[in-house]
Image (tube, rainbow, N blue to C red):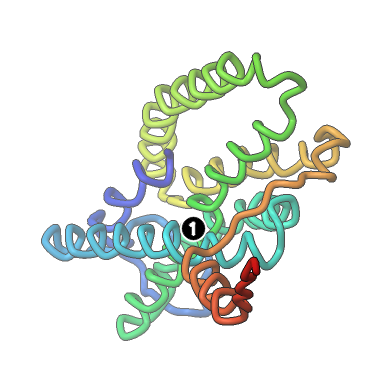
Amino acid sequence: MTYDHLLPIFLQDKRADSDMNALDISPSSLGGGLGIPIQNVGIILSLNGIIQLAIQGFVFPLLADCFGVWRLLLVVTLAHPIAYFIVPFLQLLPENLLYPGLFACLTVRNLTSILAFPLLLIMIKEATPDRSHLGRINGLAASTGAACRTVASPIAGLLYGLSIELHFTPLAWWGSALVAICGALQVPFLNRAAHECHARVRNVASDYLTKERRRSEVVHIVVEDE
């Protein structure tokens, strides 16, 4: 949630006064935002929503079917800190590469964050020792997520305000990256049964084609009683 809170502020915040030289990575060169007009920020957020829908509806089933739930969860969890770490460096890009770089960052973030939610729900279901406790465990997981959403925005705003005073915008983003690293460090401690996750996610289109192919291979036999 810190990403969603920081992104519109960072997009419309004015750029640092220093020369935006690609080779200059001093703290003064990373002390502002991207200086994008508010109208363009709205368009960017709308396009980002379309990217999220495409990833959730089409990319997630394909990747989950290809890699499996457990391996895909490992990939998105270990890669999640990268989504926060690379955002401040957008200030160093030349103007003609700003929007391609921005949407590349948004794609990385969506591939790690959007895919993580259904994967975690699947793993929670697989790790539940008794199906009668599934509702209680899912409720606890939802409550924990809601609590994190409650504190995420104030903490992100506090860090961004502090970063403005220090003229070092990455402070807010890299603080979130640190939390993501803490989450990635928990991977070795996951339940051993999680490695044997049998849940499968199938693509609707591929399932439809498979059914049609099987249907074409059906041999009809007529038995007549004399």
Which residue in the structure is indicated by mark 1? Answer: 109
Q: Residue at x 32, y 53 (%)?
A: 10
- Tell me what residue is drawn at x 77 percent, y 22 percent: 129
- Viewer-side residue, 191 vs 156: 191
Q: Is residue 184 left or right of residue 38?
A: right
User: Residue 188: x, y in percent?
Assistant: 85, 41
User: How many numbered marks appear?
Assistant: 1
Where's residue 105, x and y in %? 46, 66
Q: Amino acid at mark 1?
A: Arg
> Which picture quadrant has residue 28?
bottom left
Q: Residue furthest bottom?
A: 96
Residue extending furthest front? 226
Between residues 223 and 85, which one lies in front from this camera angle? 223
Towards the viewer: 199 or 107: 199
Q: Residues within 10 Å of mark 1 (few under 14, many from 20)?
A: many
- Residue at the location (37% across, 82% down)? 97
Q: Nearer the viewer, residue 160 or 116?
A: 116
Find numbered disc 1 in the image and state the secondary structure of the residue it sits on. helix
Regarding residue 29, the answer to whether it shows in the image is no
Q: Is residue 154 visible?
A: yes
Q: Position of residue 33 (x, y in %)?
A: 32, 58
Compared with residue 192, is residue 41 higher up or lower down, i.e. above or below?
Answer: below
Residue at (42% x, 38% y) in the render = 1
- Left or right? Give the position of 78 relative to 160: right
